[in-house]
Image (cartoon, grey):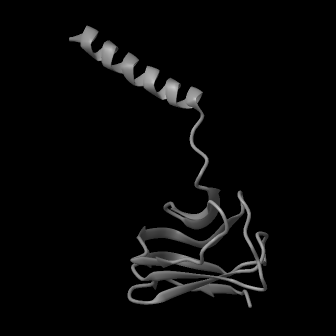
Amino acid sequence: TVGVMSITGDYNFQGGILELNLEEAFAGGFDTYTVDGNASLLGDLEVSLLSGYVPTVGDSFTFLSASLITGSFDELFLPILPGSLEFELFVDSTTATLNIIDASVVPEPSSLLLVLLGTVSLIGFRRRGK
């Protein structure tokens, strides 16, 4: 089953396993951890899919929130997803989110071209400035 855990004060996940159960991609459909202090991520993350749940592209699970998150998970234990779907872990200073992405999707050529043109322009601008 999924649940909500509220932790008062700081929490150190060092050496432990943070279990994350996913049953649906909406509030209440996955485990959440709320730390009202700081959270240190030095353990492992183990994700389980419950009740036959199969994530789809765009599903997102913000499973951890804290005043400040430091460190990173030592190891991720993730279930295999169908096709080219993959889990993507995103951790910022106050939240940790697991996203479902399509690994076969590559940036559009026009996006790559804009990045290339911007880089070339910056190099040219720097050379002219010297």
Q: Residue at x 49, y 62 (%)?
A: 93
Looking at this view, is 129 or 6 the one in front?
Answer: 129
The relative height of residue 90 versus residue 10 in the rendered view (above or below) is above
From the top left corner, tell me how far across and down residue 61 is, in percent: 67, 68
Quarter occupied by residue 87? bottom right
Residue lying furthest left: 130
The number of numbered badges drawn on the structure is 0
The relative height of residue 48 versus residue 62 in the rendered view (above or below) is below
Q: Is residue 10 visible?
A: no
Left or right, 110 with respect to 12, comes to: right
From the top left corner, tell me how far across and down residue 118 is, in percent: 44, 22
Left or right, 57 with respect to 120, comes to: right
Looking at this view, is 69 or 48 the one in front?
Answer: 48
Q: Residue at x 33, y 13 (%)?
A: 125
Quarter occupied by residue 29? bottom right
From the top left corner, tell me how far across and down residue 114 is, in percent: 52, 24
Residue lying furthest front: 83
Quarter occupied by residue 34? bottom right
Left or right, 116 with respect to 62, comes to: left
Q: Residue at x 39, y 79 (%)?
A: 42
From the top left corner, tell me how far across and down residue 120 is, in percent: 37, 19
Figure quadrant of the N terminus: bottom right
Q: Residue at x 51, y 77 (%)?
A: 37
Figure quadrant of the C terminus: top left
Q: Is residue 112 visible?
A: yes
